[in-house]
Every structure is written in structure tokens, then in C-alpha cells.
Image (cartoon, rainbow, N blue to C red):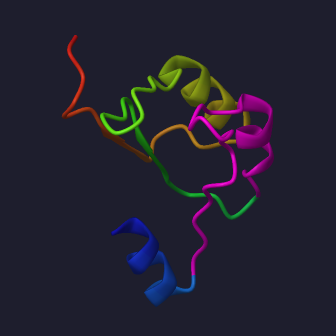
Amino acid sequence: MARCCAKRKGDETARDSCNDAGELLLDEYGKLFNSHTKLVAIAHVSNALGTINPVKDMIATAHQHGVTRNWLMERKQCRI
């Protein structure tokens, strides 16, 4: 859904920051930010792949790039 909305508005979405197992590559994730980044939308857990994203590290990286307030985190499939 996010990709469809982004295409309509002319924005970009990125999915190239994962390896073949679906695990997040934090170095690649950090390269996705630029001066136009306004929102970060992530899934905490993937039930399809069984991966758990390092949300704290992802938030810290986003803060380093100036994204401090606009977050969308899906956590429907995780237990806290």
C-alpha cells in the first residue's frame, strides 16, 4: 500500500536495504536517507520471513538523519 501511495505522489519507497533472507542491513538502510526524507514506515516483525527488525537502531539512524517525529511502525504481529 505504501508503494502505491508513494507512486501516486511521486515519492520514493526503498526496499533494497535487506539481504536475501529478508534481514535488514543497517548500513544500507542509513544510505536511504536524504534531505527530502519526511517519514519512515517499518514493520517490526515479519511473519512471512520470521525476521525481527532492530527498531531501536533504525530509529537512532533516522534521528541522525533528521527524521525525529514522523514514524509509522506496524507491530501487529509481535508480542511485547
Q: Quadrant of the N terminus?
A: bottom left
Q: Quadrant of the C terminus?
A: top left
Q: Quadrant of residue 35?
A: bottom right
* Residue nearest the viewer, comparing 80 with 59: 80
* Residue nearest the viewer, comparing 51 with 37: 51
How many numbered tags mark residues here?
A: 0
* Residue 2 on image: x %, y %: 39, 67
Question: What residue is shown at x 44% (from left), y 89% (from top)?
Answer: 8
Question: What residue is shown at x 80% (from left), y 46% (from top)?
Answer: 31
In this view, 22 is above or below 10? above
| Magenta residues, dominant SS class | loop
Question: What residue is shown at x 37% (from left), y 35% (from top)?
Answer: 46
Q: Which residues are magenta?
A: 11-34
In this view, 6 is above or below 80? below
Question: What residue is shown at x 63% (from left), y 32% (from top)?
Answer: 63
Q: Quadrant of residue 3?
A: bottom left
- Is residue 72 inside the magenta stretch? no
* Residue 44 on image: x %, y %: 38, 30
* Residue 75 on image: x %, y %: 26, 32
- Is residue 15 inside the magenta stretch? yes
* Residue nearest the viewer, comparing 66 with 16: 16
* Residue 33 on image: x %, y %: 72, 51
Q: Which residue is farthest top?
A: 80
